[in-house]
Image (tube, coloured by chain):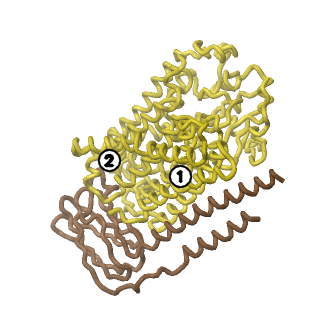
Chain colours: A yellow, B brown
Amino acid sequence: MSPVTPQHASSARGRLELTRWSVVRGVLRQRALNWVLMTLALLGFAVAILAGLAGTAVGSANFGIVFVWIVWWGLLMCVLLPLGGRAWCLICPVPAPGEWVQRGALVRPPVAGEVGLPLAISAPDRPINGLPFTLGWRWPTRLRGIWLQNIGFLGVALFSTVILTQPWITGWVLLGFLVGALGLALLFERRAFCRYVCPVGGFIGLYSLLAPLELRVKDPVVCQNHWTKECYLGSASGYGCPWLEQPWRLDRNAYCGLCGECLRTCPKDNVAVSVRWPGTDLLMARGWRLDEAYKAFIMLACAAIYPVVLLGPWGWLKAWANLDWLPGFGLYAAAFLALNLVGVPGAHLGIAALVRRAVGLREVPLGQLFVALAYPLVPLGLAAWLAFTLSFVFANLSYALPVLSDPFGWGWNLLGTRDVAWQPWLAGGVLILQTLLLIAGMVGAIGTADGVLRQFAGGRRAVWGLAIQALLLTGETIFFLWLYLGALA
Amino acid sequence: MRRGIVLVVFLALGAVVLLAPWPVPAPRASEREIVIRGRQYAYAPGVFRVSQGERVTMVLEAEDVTHGLYVDGYGVDLVAVPGRPARASFVADREGKFRLRCSKVCGSLHPFMLGELIVEPNGPWWRAVGLTILTAAGTVTYLTVGRAGARREVSA
């Protein structure tokens, strides 16, 4: 038996266990909690799809555009993700129909015969449960990781100018998410769509590493001596982890959807939801991976491209990104993909090589250092996305009031707010918030770089590496500040 | 202890960067008229610069459909229909970058029809740059001092 050190336990120093309070524990263990949240979200989602497909073509008067790309996006980026990590995944309606069909149930736990055998954990080609409405295939090994999510995100991001502004396209995209998740649920086990395909889930997972909220086992030793693993296989109290995580091994937020099933199934009461110091997961070297590193680069690149394209003063660039002129869009797409896939990763590869040389890490493969040094981009990237989100969310949030009264643009006035005029909110304060967020993101990034480098080298040598990283991160922060405070032309 | 000193020193320097008076010439009391043409989905010019203290008259001409022009931070709001320009005057008494936004729905990309007013000297931008560099230097110093301290403790 391998030794387990207690520092990963959620009761360790620096964590406040929220589930020690019976009210919190009771609410999170309620089976109906997920159903209520997902059903409410699904209703909103359905209205958004309907509005997109059948409502007005004017984006700023269409529920699909305003409530998805302004209200939901603002809530996700400014509140749920920074504070709750994957909290959105608990609410998200996209996997709901598929999961309900898979289980043949909305709320109830598995009945006798649906719970798999412990043996299935070590038999990867065998369906691990006997749920009635899915073929229960294992996700192909070659497609594991978040590469598909990276590709999906790049696809959505490339066409984002039309998706964000054309209601019918938003409607079809949302419907595509729903149908895709349902289709995969019928073929594959558990939430394969969320885990391996969802373009949104990819970046939520990466940025959830930074969140101050975590779900972990309290004491790994308890799990080591407990062989029935209800948290993974399910029991009469709940389903096995829908995210295909083995909770007793959880030491990062990236792929835990916070659904709470393991809280319900653990017979040892050994699962806890806690508040911890933000960014703790970033230094978990065991989880550093190239696909996640690429996600960090893609997110950073997009956080730089969007303000230029969407918030910049260049009409021709918006027209290109909006597919108004196909050769122009071709140029835009080439530049977009080159920057995302080659430019930003290439620049960071060069810096990693410089750090390796300066610190004298000849024994460390460059690829390993390159991946590790992508993780400091998580706090900076999230700050850059927050800054971008603040730019357009507060400026356009007032569109939500008329849309609430007339979601389809059909002339309704349900709440009497249809004629509320557009007014940008917090116009003066946004720049200050953006500046503070970007500087905080940079501090987090430099701190993470320090923590990463300490795992490779100590002493004075590592200081040179930190100095190089700090220069890079400072330059990137100033670039982002320039997008919001400097003159773009 | 040494970390505490680093923190205090850099906080003090940060306060200087934020609060120190900007060494610039006194604001000019001149006037300027700027004609801005609005067309889906950009203004021309997209960026215009004025000096702090100038009285600015903005004339908005809509070239295709009705466009608006809202100036963040100044609250100026113009609406022009094709053939009927709109104008408004204000004193550019606050320095910095202020976005111009179309305030009348003008098409699919309307929320992203933006321009920029730069009231020079753009103090907030330069102060933010200074604060960023200072914060980065302070963070590295803080972490490095901490590391040196930890090494001494270990060797002791």
| Of the pair A215 and B70, the residue shown nearer to us | A215
Q: Is residue A39 visible?
A: no
Q: Is residue A296 visible?
A: yes
Chain under disc 1: A
Residue at 58% across, 52% down: A445
Q: Quadrant of residue A339?
A: top left
Residue at 46% across, 81% down: B23
Residue identified by numbered label 1: A380
Q: Quadrant of the N terminus of chain A?
A: top right
Chain under disc 2: A
Residue identified by numbered label 2: A410
Secondary structure at numbered mark 2 = loop
Q: Examine the rendered structure and indicate whether residue B61 appears above or below residue A111.
A: below
| Of the pair A437 and A75, the residue shown nearer to us | A437
Task: Identify residue type, mark 1.
Answer: Leu
Between the residue at mark 2 and the residue at mark 1, the CA separation in whole angstroms equals 42 Å
Say whether residue A446 is left or right of residue A8.
left
Secondary structure at numbered mark 1 = helix
Say whether residue A480 is left or right of residue A225.
left
Q: Examine the rendered structure and indicate whether residue B110 appears above or below residue A189.
A: below
Q: Answer yes or no: are tags 2 and 1 on the same subunit.
A: yes
Give residue A408's mark: none
Q: Examine the rendered structure and indicate whether residue B3 appears above or below residue B94.
A: above
